[in-house]
Image (cartoon, helix red, strand yellow):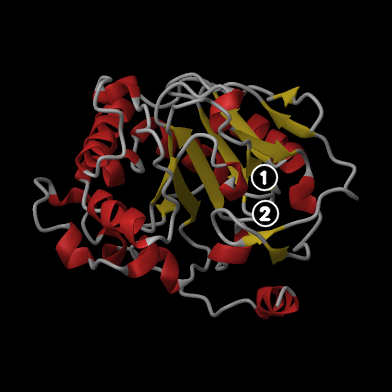
Amino acid sequence: MSALVPFLRSSVDDSAETLRAHMAEDGYLFFPQLIPDKSILNVRREILALCSEADWLDSERETEEGIAASGVACVEGQPEFMRVYNRLQHSEAFHALAHTSALLEVLERLFGEQPLPHARNIARIIFPQNVRFTTPSHQDYIHIQGTEQTYTTWIPLGECPEELGSLTVLRGSHTLGILPVHKADGAGGLGIDTDSLQNEWVGGDFKIGDAILFHSLAVHKALPNTTPERIRLSVDFRYQPLSHPVHSSSMEPHHGQVKWSEIYRDWIDPQFQYYWQRLPLNYADLDSRVQTVRAAAG
């Protein structure tokens, strides 16, 4: 992969017209230091504590460094990974991060109406040197459905230089429609062949608090975590205009192995519990176009 073109930077002070114009042209918005450091570090500490309890971290190093134990490389879907991941889903701080006020304010300006945060919040724990399972080029709409006007916010939980596996976006690819997919390793299990696409890849290093927001049809991927020993932690949160249709799966816990009643059991603040049940949602059926594309992948 050739050198990345740097992200075009957006600001919380940009007008709605500016945000919409940049999103319409590029398919993404990159916001430096949008998320408070304290909120990110709280979630990071909780996840790393779970990793430590699972003996995934080097016991000779400080937990907050996120240094993988020698020979450990779990991936999403494996039983040992899911035991930790399902515990992570109980974290109140993790789910509350999706409701960060600065982020919701930007989304409301972009949408021109109240944003709906999806409840299916996702965390990624990416081990070093496990290149085969790097998240492949893909479009989120294939997995989300509902409305195409759904946007993912990707937030690394700490500094994330390119070599740690930062996220990249194929600029302007959200205008290409639903693209053919093939089976692939890595999160989601489906990839897109981008060799014939003329769009340029944009990306770069992420500082703590940086966040990128991108359209559900924007092709994106992770860079491989090529560091010798560091685990990469990040989160995926998704949002859409409240008036648009949403698929019911977007309001279920990620992977569905734990129930909301279990997740909420020890929460202190009820503010973000079952919040979508208090909203006038318009539920959508599965998109037949997606079913056709997925079936063609075998």
The residue depicted at 12 percent of the width and 46 percent of the height is 269
The quadrant in which the N terminus is found is top right
Q: Quadrant of residue 192?
A: bottom right
Q: Alpha carbon of mark 1 to alpha carbon of mark 2: how far?
A: 6 Å
Closer to the camera in the image, 205 or 144: 205
Q: Amino acid at mark 2?
A: His
Earlier residue among tags 1 and 2: 2
Q: Amino acid at mark 1?
A: His
Rendering coords of residue 41 (x, y %) = 30, 26
Figure check: 206 above or below 274: above
Q: Quadrant of residue 177?
A: bottom right
Q: Which residue is mark 1?
A: 220
Mark 2, Cα crowd under 10 Å, few <14 / some 14-19 / many 20+, is many
Closer to the camera in the image, 106 or 296: 296
Figure check: 285 above or below 131: below
**Residue 246, can we see it?**
yes
The residue depicted at 75 percent of the width and 77 percent of the height is 296
Closer to the camera in the image, 138 or 31: 138
- Residue 138's disc is 2
SS for dot 2: loop
The residue depicted at 42 percent of the width and 72 percent of the height is 248
